[in-house]
Image: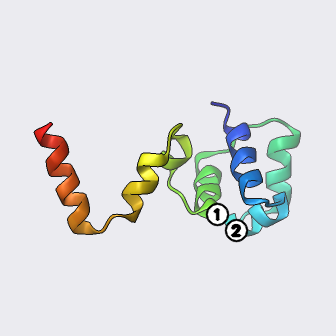
Amino acid sequence: MDILTRIKQLRDERGWSNYKLAKEADISEGSLNNLFRLNNQPTIPTLEALCKGFDMSLSQFFAEGKEMLDIWATLDKEQKAALLELLKKM
């Protein structure tokens, strides 16, 4: 998966502009625009900031089928423990 394509996909899913994403990620709009204009890959700290702006972890960013991670995020501590026990027994 191309990182810039994934960033665009997540941005577009939310109906955000680069300005809105930069604001949510607490990075400069110029830095974000330069990534796309120069077709550069973001540094790890920049990617972490973008993920924070999207309210997701790096693992969620790179997950192709993130449905399981989304479901996991909705579970409380006891439900997570029960699910882990079930998976161990399988």
Name the side, left or right, on which 17 lies relative to 57.
Answer: right
Q: Residue reaching furthest right?
A: 37
Q: Residues within 10 Å of mark 2 (few under 14, many from 20)?
A: some
Residue 4 in the image, given as x and y percentages of width and height: 73, 40
Amino acid under disc 2: Glu
Q: Quadrant of residue 19?
A: bottom right
Task: Say which residue appears at 20% left-offset and 67% top-offset.
Answer: 78
From mark 2 to mark 1, how far is it between C-alphas?
A: 5 Å
Q: Quadrant of residue 15?
A: bottom right
Q: Nearer the viewer, residue 67 or 49?
A: 67
Residue contact between numbered discs 2 and 1, judged by CB atoms under 8 Å: yes
Quadrant in the picture for the C terminus: top left
Residue 48 in the image, given as x and y percentages of width and height: 57, 54
- Label at residue 75: none
Q: Nearer the viewer, residue 46 or 90?
A: 90
Quadrant in the picture for the N terminus: top right
SS at badge 1: helix
Q: Nearer the viewer, residue 8 or 82?
A: 82
Question: What residue sits right under mark 2 in the picture?
Answer: 24
Of mark 2 and mark 1, the one earlier in the sequence is: 2
Question: What residue sits right under mark 1 in the picture?
Answer: 53
Amino acid under disc 1: Gly
Q: Give above or below for 31 relative to 90.
A: below
Task: Say which residue appears at 65% left-offset and 56% top-offset.
Answer: 50
The chosen color scheme is rainbow
Q: Give above or below for 23 relative to 89.
A: below
Q: Residues within 10 Å of mark 1 (few under 14, many from 20)?
A: some
Name the side, left or right, on which 44 lies relative to 68.
Answer: right
Q: Residue reaching furthest top?
A: 1
Task: Say which residue appears at 85% left-offset and 47% top-offset.
Answer: 34
